[in-house]
Amino acid sequence: MGANTANTIGALGTSLRILEALKEKGSAGVTELANELDLPKSTVYSHLRTLREHEYVDWQDESYCIGLKFLDFGEHARDRMGIYDVAKPEVQSLADETGELANLLVEEHGEGVYLFRAKGEQAVNLDTHAGMRVGLHCTSLGKAVLAYLPEERVDEIVDRWGLPARTATTISTREELDEELAAIRERGYATDNGERLSGLRCVAAPITNPDGHAIGAVSVSGPTSRMKGETFRSEVPERVRSAANVIELNLTYS
Amino acid sequence: MGANTANTIGALGTSLRILEALKEKGSAGVTELANELDLPKSTVYSHLRTLREHEYVDWQDESYCIGLKFLDFGEHARDRMGIYDVAKPEVQSLADETGELANLLVEEHGEGVYLFRAKGEQAVNLDTHAGMRVGLHCTSLGKAVLAYLPEERVDEIVDRWGLPARTATTISTREELDEELAAIRERGYATDNGERLSGLRCVAAPITNPDGHAIGAVSVSGPTSRMKGETFRSEVPERVRSAANVIELNLTYS
DNA sequence: AACAGTTGTTCACAGTCGCAGAACGTGTTT
DNA sequence: AAACACGTTCTGCGACTGTGAACAACTGTT
C-alpha cells in the first residue's frame, strides 16, 4: 500500500495510524476505526488484537482504548529531557507567585510540545496538557522559541508545517512572522494578546543553550482583566525572563 | 518466528520489544539493541527507521531514544481514567498535610501502575514515577488493592505474576499473602514496614467501586523516624482512609 | 599509513505473514 | 423473524518482512 521509501515496516505504520485514531477518539470499536482510516475491518482487528495481547490497548465497556503502558514511555521520554527536571520547580514558582497558569514547552520536530504546566491560585482552565503538540507560530511559547532559532531552521519549520490560521488573529504570512520575531528579539520575550483565545494573554521567554539557540520556553497565561498595565508590560515579563534565565544557568552548570 | 496464536501482527510485536528495550536502556544504538534482543541488526534498523520516520523515536547524540509523542499517549491514557482527576487534589492534600510523599496507584492487568505522586515539604526521594509498574504483592498500595479484589481475581493475578521476592521481607508464599490480606481487611488499610526499602514505612487505603471491589489505592510514605507511634498507628491511617473515602464518593456521585 | 575494530546503513533474495474480502455468531432493532 | 449492527474467524494470494552479507564512515592501534 504505502509506497513509502524503502526499508520501512508497513505494518508498523498501520499500527501507529490506528493508535493515533484511537487516541483522537478516546475510545472506539473496530468498525468505527476501519471506516475512519479506510482500512478493512479485519486488518484493524489484527492490529488491535496484537496491541491488546501486548497490553498496549485495553478492551473496556465494549470498545478499545489506549492502555496505561504508554504512560511509562511518556514519562521516560520526558524525564530524559534534562530541561524537565531543572525547569519544573521554576515553572511551579512562576505559577505560585503570579497566581496564574505557567507552562513549559520544548521544540521537537518543528512543533511545540508542552512538557509541564502548573496552576496558581486563580489560574484559568485551559485545554493545554502535557504531551500536547502545537504549531510554534500560534502561541507565545512557540514564537519565543522561533525567535531564537537559526533562520534556516525557521525556514525548514515553516516549509514543513506552514502557518495555518487557528484564529482570526494568528500570524499567517512569513512577513508578519519575521516582524514579530524581530520584535521579540528586541524585547527579549514574546506575548500573545488574545491570539489563541480571546480574553487570554500570555508572556513567554525562551530558554536557550550556550550557543544562543532556543530549546524551549516558559510562559505565564492569564485573563486580560488581570494581565494589564505594569503587570503585563514589565512585572510578568521580568519574572518570566528571570525564570528562563535560572533554567539556562542550571542547565549549563550541572 | 514468533509461534504465537493466530491473527497477530508479528512485526508489531518486534517493534514493541525494541521500544521496550530502548526505554529500559534510555538510549541505545542499533547493534546494542540487536545483541540484547537477539535479532539481526538489519531488522532492528528497519524498525527503528520506521519509528524514526513516524517520529516516535529520535536520533540524538549518536543514539536512538524514545520520542515525546509517547507523552501525549500517556497523558491521554491517564486522563481517560476517571479516578485521576478526582484523586489528584486529594493526593496533593495528603502530601501537603502530612509533609510526606503521597501516591495514587491503580490496577491494570494484574499489576500496579502509579498514576500520580505528590511531594510534601519533607518528602523522601523515591524511585517511583507516574507510569511505573510494580507487583501488587510488594507494596502497601498493591496489598490494599489485592485485599479488596474478588478471591478468584487474586488467584488469577498470583497465577500470572507469581510472588517474586523483591527484598528479604517481601511476601512470597500464598499463605503469608492470605493472612496479610485478611489483616488488611480487618484494619481497613495496608502498611509496608520497610518491606520495599528498609527505613521506609507506607500506609495505603484502597479505593473501591460501589460493588466493594478495589480499583486503586492511595498512600503516604515516609521514613520510620517520622512514621511511628500514634502517627503511624492511627493519624496517618485515618487521613489516608478519609482521602480514599472522599475519592470513592466523588467517583460514584459525579 | 595501512589495518582491524567499531558503528549505522544498504542490498537482494526467499519464504512467510499481513492484507483483504467474505463468512460466522451474537445481540439489538425494526 | 428478518434485517442490521457489531466483533471475530477463516482462507488464499502476493507483497513485505526478516535475513545475512556487503558497504561506507570512523576510531584507535600498530
Image (cartoon, coloured by chain):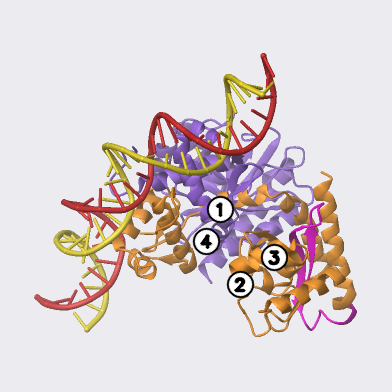
Chain colours: A orange, B purple, C yellow, D red
Chain at numbered mark 1: A
- Residue B7 against residue A179 in the figure, above or below: above
Which residue type carries mark 3?
A: Val
Tag 1: residue type? Leu
Q: Which residue is mark 3?
A: A154
Chain that bears disc 2? A
SS for callout 2: loop
Q: Secondary structure at mark 4?
A: loop
- Kindly indicate whether the residue at mark 4 contacts the one at mark 1 (C-beta within 8 angstroms): no
In the image, which residues are magenta? A203-230
- Please state if A245 lies on the left or on the right of A77 as rendered: right
How far, Cα to Cα, is label 1 from label 4?
Answer: 12 Å
Residue C22 position in % (x across, y down): 16, 64
Q: Which residue is mark 1?
A: A71
- Circle 2 is placed at which residue position? A162
> Does residue C3 sit above or below B99 in this rendering?
above
Q: Which mark is residue B81?
A: 4
Counting residues from the start of the chain, the first of labels 3 and 1 encountered is 1
- From mark 2 to mark 1, how far is it between C-alphas? 31 Å
Q: Have a look at marks 3 and 1 and say if they share a chain.
A: yes
Q: Secondary structure at mark 3?
A: helix
Quarter of the picture holding the N terminus of chain B: top left
Q: Is residue A122 visible?
A: no
Residues marked 4 and 2, same chain: no
Give me the disc on residue B95.
none
